[in-house]
Amino acid sequence: MPVKIRLARHGRKRYAYYHIVVADSRAPRDGKFIERIGSYNPNTNPATINLNFDKALEWLGKGAQPTDTTRAILSYKGVMMKKHLLEGVKKGAFDEAEAEKRFDAWLAGKEGKIQAKKDQLAGAKADATKERLEQEAKINSERAEALAAKKAELAAEAEAAAKAAAAEAAGEEAEEVAEEGAEEAPEAPAAE
């Protein structure tokens, strides 16, 4: 029975995640499988990979063939490296302690790269947030200045209107006083 390590699609439309499964190559993609050994979610950045390392290594040792994508995932997680080192131990190129030492060194370097990428993404996100907040503060200050200018303009208009109304009222009072004064003044005799 030809056994493959491959991905089985799950999730909704345009938002897929995958189970990493060991299955008969003749079985349908999302159909019957022998064992589920992990999951892969490409929707996150960086992609989330949960893998049972020992089971994957065991199935590779039994002769299961990974598909191209799962081979890349297994390489990323170090399963293919570990298999390669174990083959070297079987051939007598070095002992198992040396293989573990080499694998640990490789794994430490890989984890450093992954952490650096996560830090870079977090820094970029923080920078974008900071820039967005600065732009919002600038826009808010411009709006506040425009609002203050508009309020000052309205206050000036209201003050001018009040002065005009007061001047008009004072002018009307002066006219009334003049009219009253003209009515009270005796008429001068007409010269004959």
Image (cartoon, rainbow, N blue to C red):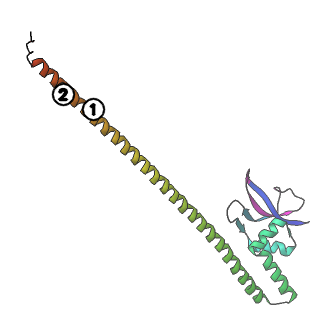
Amino acid type, callout 1: Ala
Residue 164 position by quadrant: top left
Residue most toward the right?
Answer: 1
Query: In percent of the image, x 81 and y 78: which residue is there?
Result: 83
Relative to the observer, which residue lies in front, 170 or 119? 170
The x and y percentages for residue 175 are 19, 25
Q: Nearer the viewer, mark 1 or mark 2?
A: 2
Residue most toward the top?
Answer: 192
Residue 58 position by quadrant: bottom right
Helix, strand or loop at label 1? It is helix
Residue marked by disc 1: 165
Q: How many marks?
A: 2
Check the image and report above or below for 171 versus 45: above
Amino acid type, callout 2: Ala
The x and y percentages for residue 179 are 16, 21
The x and y percentages for residue 19 are 76, 61
Span colored in magenta: 11-34
- Please tell me whether residue 15 belongs to the stretch shown in magenta: yes
Numbered mark located on residue 174 in the image: 2
